[in-house]
Each structure stands twice: as structure tokens, then as C-alpha cells.
Image (cartoon, rainbow, N blue to C red):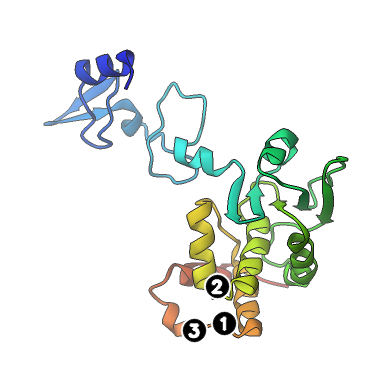
């Protein structure tokens, strides 16, 4: 803690809700509540961490770091489309290849990286399963960055399927593992359904659908009922 932070810590009260020290606090009954909590300015990703009102970022420090290059397994990385263009950063991670998935994105054309491109929308009706085998073969050749627009759904689905196959994991374990490396991972419900089918193909599944009632995957499966797939 530097001198400035020490002065703030000792000179201003802590918010009773977020337990952080702020310049501006409000007395609400017997509690001190910061303005950030009152206006509910929380991280745009985790939705729980309070963001300072004067912060130029919409994300908390932890989630912002998670949005950078995330190493999922040795040789397999995920990022969003912005970070994917930071070629010096990719080189610092030893990345040799870039796999891009997204109709709204352009394939990479850089002499220092081999590239693969998949045109696919982040939609519950898209067939991402058909690309698993080709993507897996590409990823296995050299250290690879897999990215879509945000590094949350499409790229995550490809990497989760890769982990399921090569680490012999169930979908539940692979999803939990990948989220431990990149907390923003969240495949859309259609992709979750296809990953469940892929799990059965691999023979790694350990449960039936009714057993998922109290598991986070059940929420994603339930979401499928809100879409009309044609």
C-alpha cells in the first residue's frame, strides 16, 4: 500500500456493503454506503464487484485480466478479437497459430503466425460440432490462440471440446476447469447441447440429464426451451 492509499484508508470510512474505502459515502440509517453501491455500478462481467465511479473501465481488475490472453492448457490459449491482434503479446506467450471463429471477424494474415478461420455466428442454431475435428487437428500442431469476438462462447466451446477429448474429461469437469482459467467462459445454450452430445460420443459422460437439476449446466439446458429452433 503506497502513501496515498494509506491516507485514504485511514481518512475515509469503509462502505458497509462492499467493504471498500471511498471518498464519497452516504449515511443510510446506521450504515455507511458508498455512492457506487447506491447507483449499482458493478463489473459488467461478474456483476458483483463494485467499480469506482471515476473508473474508465466497465470491468473489475480480476475480470479485466481474464479478458486478456488466457492460458487454458499448455499450448492452448483464448482471447477476444482485440487482444488477438496484439502480436507481440501473443509471441510473448509462445503462440505460433491463431484460430479465428466468427462471421463478423476477418482471418489473420501475419507472416509469423499460421491461421485458421471458421465462419460461424454465436447463435443457438449454429452447428459448431462439425468444426470440432478440424479445429482439434489445427490446435494440436503448435501453441494456438483460439478467439472469437469476446472469447466467451464460440472460442470457448472449441477449447472445451478439445479439453474433453484430449484430457478425457466430462463436459461438467471440462467446463469447470476452463472457467478456472478464464472466468468469463459461457457457451450459449445451443453449444452446451452440442457439447453434451459430444460427451456421449466420447463416452466420458457420468450422469443423465435429470441428475443435473442442481448443477449449473442445468440452467444452460433449461435456456434452450426459450428458443424456437427452426
Q: Identify the residue at horizontal 38%, vertical 40% (top origin).
A: 49
Q: How far apart are marks 1 and 2 (CA)?
A: 8 Å
**Position of 92 relative to 198 (above/below):** above
Q: How many labels does the image show?
A: 3
In the rendered image, which quarter contains the C terminus? Answer: bottom right
In the rendered image, which quarter contains the N terminus? Answer: top left
User: Whole-percent x and y of residue 183?
Assistant: 50, 51
User: Whole-percent x and y of residue 78?
Assistant: 64, 50
| Labelled pair 1, 2 in contact (Cβ < 8 Å) | yes
Left or right of 158 in this view: 106: right
Q: Which of marks 1 and 2 is nearer the N terminus?
A: 2
Q: Identify the residue at horizontal 37%, vertical 35% (top origin).
A: 50
Q: Where is mark 1, residue-wise?
A: 204
- Nearer mark to the viewer, of 1 and 2: 1
Q: In the rendering, which numbered label is found on residue 171?
A: 2
User: Whole-percent x and y of residue 69?
Assistant: 62, 44
- The residue nearer to you, when weighing 51 against 27, is 51
Left or right of 108 in this view: 94: left
Residue 141, quarter of the rendered image: bottom right
Q: Which of marks 2 and 3 is nearer the N terminus?
A: 2
- The residue nearer to you, when weighing 22 against 87, is 87
Q: How far apart are marks 3 and 1 (CA)?
A: 7 Å
Amino acid at each position: 500500500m503506497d502513501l496515498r492509499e494509506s491516507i485514504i484508508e485511514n481518512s475515509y470510512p469503509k462502505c458497509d456493503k462492499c467493504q471498500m474505502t471511498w471518498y464519497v459515502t452516504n449515511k443510510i440509517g446506521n450504515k455507511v454506503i458508498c455512492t457506487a453501491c447506491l447507483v449499482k455500478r458493478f463489473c459488467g462481467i461478474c456483476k458483483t464487484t463494485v467499480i469506482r465511479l471515476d473508473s474508465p473501465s466497465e470491468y473489475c481488475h480480476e475480470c479485466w485480466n481474464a479478458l486478456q490472453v488466457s492460458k487454458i492448457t499448455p499450448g492452448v490459449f483464448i482471447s477476444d478479437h482485440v487482444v488477438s491482434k496484439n502480436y507481440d503479446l501473443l509471441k510473448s506467450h509462445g503462440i505460433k497459430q491463431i484460430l479465428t471463429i466468427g462471421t463478423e471477424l476477418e482471418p489473420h494474415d501475419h507472416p509469423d503466425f499460421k491461421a485458421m478461420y471458421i465462419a460461424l455466428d454465436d447463435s443457438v442454431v449454429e452447428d459448431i460440432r462439425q468444426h470440432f475435428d478440424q479445429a482439434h487437428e489445427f490446435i494440436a500442431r503448435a501453441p494456438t490462440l483460439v478467439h472469437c469476438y469476446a472469447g466467451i462462447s464460440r472460442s470457448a466451446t472449441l477449447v472445451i471440446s478439445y479439453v474433453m477429448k484430449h484430457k478425457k474429461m466430462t463436459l461438467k469437469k471440462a467446463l469447470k476447469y476452463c472457467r478456472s482459467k478464464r472466468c468469463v467462459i459461457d457457451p450459449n445454450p445451443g453449444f452446451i447441447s452440442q457439447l453434451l452430445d459430444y460427451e456421449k460420443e466420447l463416452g466420458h459422460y457420468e450422469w443423465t440429464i435429470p441428475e443435473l437439476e442442481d448443477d449449473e449446466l442445468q440452467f444452460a439446458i433449461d435456456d434452450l426451451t426459450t428458443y424456437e429452433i427452426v
